[in-house]
Image (cartoon, rainbow, N blue to C red):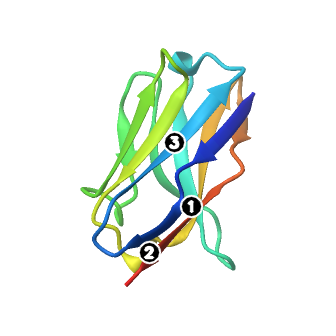
Amino acid sequence: VQLQASGGGLVQAGGSRRLSCKVSGAVLRLAPIAWYRQVPGNERELVADMDSGGSRNYAASVTGRFTIERDNSKNWIFLQMNNLKSEDTAVYYCNVRWRSRDFWGRGTLVTVSS
């Protein structure tokens, strides 16, 4: 299973960014998916996840601003981020759980300038 994330970059506070993650080697419609983020020196934290049935869960800090999405037909995972804040600055990782194993993308850096 391979995951390739993209979409990171520099964005102003209050702006939006859409992260994408192409998944290969798994049947995405059967797999739980997630986005995590990590700031240097901190642990990786869950941002949002979605089970195979479509139920979503969000960290309190992003609820109402971020949306996790999936395109099962094309094997893509997305994270729509709106009203970005400086504290959202981090490396973002996509995640797929397939056959009881976790698979990770390389990470994409999002920097929010205030």
- Amino acid type at image mark 3: Ser
Image side of residue 64 versus residue 50, left or right: left
The residue identified by callout 1 is 37
Contact (CB < 8 A) between labels 1 and 2? no
> Residue at (48%, 14%) from the top-left corner?
73
Work out whether 71 lies above or below 3.
above
Circle on res. 112: 2
Question: Residue 87, located in which quarter of the rendered image?
Answer: bottom left
- Amino acid type at image mark 2: Val
For label 1, the SS is: strand
Image side of residue 50 versus residue 26, left or right: left
> Residue at (48%, 19%) from the top-left corner?
72
For label 3, the SS is: strand
For the residues marked 1 and 3, what is the alpha-carbon distance in whole angstroms? Answer: 14 Å
Looking at this view, name the residue that lies furthest to the bottom: 114
Q: How many marks?
A: 3
Sequence-wise, the earlier of marks 1 and 2 is 1
> Residue at (43%, 46%) from the top-left corner?
79
Contact (CB < 8 A) between labels 2 and 3? no
Looking at this view, name the residue that lies furthest to the left: 64
Work out whether 86 lies above or below 100.
below
Report the front residue among 2 and 57: 2
Between circles 1 and 2, the one closer to the viewer is 2
